Image (spheres, rainbow, N blue to C red):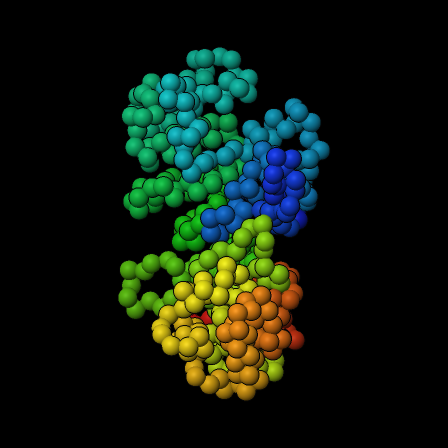
Amino acid sequence: MTDTLLSVRNLEKHFPVTEGLLRRQVGTVKAVDGVSFDVHRGEAFGLVGESGCGKSTTALSILQLEEPTGGEVLFDGEPISDLGKRELRQYRRQVQLVLQDPESAFNDRMTIAETVAEPLRVHGMTDSERRREVVEDTLARVGLGDEDPDSYPHEFSGGEKQRIAIARALVLNPDLIIADEPVSALDGRTKSDVLGLLKELQTEFDLSVLLISHDIDVVRQFCDRVAVMYLGSLVESGPTAEVVENPHHPYTQMLLGSVPSLDPTESHTSTDLLTDELPDAADLPTGCQFHPRCPSIIPPSDVELPREEWLGVVAFRLSLSDGYASIDALRQSLSGTGDLGSRVRETFEIPPTLSDSAVEAALAETIDILDGGDLAGASDPLEAVTESICERHTPELQEIETPHPVACHRYDAEEPGAPETEIEANTFARQ
């Protein structure tokens, strides 16, 4: 027996993209792409990221409800891919899942007593009186001891239904609960109550909890450690307090910047993204996958532009790469009046003349090409002088501070954009 209960190593889950009657494969969605983390005994570990980043697919792959494409999952040191049918059944007893919407797993024709007792029956507890005793005890532990066990799910509020779902997961006395967005559908007070209940149960039963959420504030309140996930990959991880107080990755800073505060004097990290749009999961960007949105994208070493000018130019170039349907579509997306060049500069907040003459010449050439009606090759002159390392190379998850790894080129020692200190790193994102 080790301190590590669950170990995820280079986990991958890819889905084919098909088309036509013959369902010919034309691409791949890498929903989970090389994810690694550990969950320790008695620990609350958070997996946080926007919807669609692969968190839930990671959970289903851990449970073997989705067959992984690659990598491995170890539970108590044993690879679950090696488990036979009986051992896999026992594994699923030890690892229980709580979903965002408990109603999707409830049978309206079953009472809550029957609902909570169902896992016991499936796993071989044949004594109905004993099942009833265990169910009533478990319902009491989740704060529903005064409710009638023979009531039906529709008679309960959203928060009470989530407590029933937790009771059903708890009734088998698991070692690990995977809670997938367990409070996202609840109001503020109910959300706090359910999180408090989970924390009490975790302490009482020495449970490990893998909490999945799009809300980094929920993770901050509940988890000991956290991993931040973006488009199938981890970009940062570490002790929750450290990650929240000193976020390294611009994406983590974005998540934190989106959390509302009741304190008007409290500062936030910048959320001025180049674009709010998520990339197509079947056609992910090269290099750092966050670079099309990143306000801290690194300029080439020979580009000398103020940050605002640099971000305006790169946002314009990347918008061309997104592929407008036509020149007319491009024109319609621009603000202002006048010639194309003036409207581009106004829309992307680029000054009439850039301070870097080489970039100014490339921008003027790009606008001339667009004026001539060639959309496809218009970005080539700008790309030649402004392409970032963030577009060319995928950053590796590396430890800047132990134990707080990050996958960001700003922390590559040889890069001119690398911040020398943590204060500088966070300041760069706010400028």
Q: Which residue is drawn at the image coordinates 48% and 82% (left, top)?
A: 306
Q: Nearer the viewer, residue 383 or 184?
A: 383
Vertical placement of 398 versus 234: above or below? Answer: below
Q: Residue furthest front?
A: 372
Residue 301 vs 62, above or below: the answer is below
Which percent across, then down, holds residue 252? 48, 60
**Percent position of residue 377, x then y:** 59, 69
Task: Farthest residue to the right: give it.
Answer: 82
In this rendering, would 248 be left or right of 261?
right
Q: Nearer the viewer, residue 109 or 290?
A: 290
* Residue 409 or residue 425, whichever sits in front: 409
Vertical arrangement, residue 176 with respect to residue 111, above or below? below
Residue 272's spot in the image, x, y percent?
42, 67
Q: Quadrant of residue 289?
A: bottom right
Judge whether residue 373 can be spotted in this image.
yes
Classify the position of the C terminus by image quarter.
bottom left
**On the rendered structure, is 187 left or right of 339?**
left
167 left or right of 178 in image: left
Q: Going 52% across and 42% down the picture, which residue do you hit?
A: 56
Kindly tell me whether residue 38 is visible in this rendering: no
Q: Please report the residue visible at 55 percent of the width from the left and 58 percent of the height from the top.
A: 236
Quadrant position of the N terminus in the picture:
top right
Name the residue rendered at 31%, 26% in the picture: 154
Q: Is residue 190 above or below residue 228?
A: above
**Residue 182 x %, y %:** 42, 40
So how many labels did they put on this image? 0
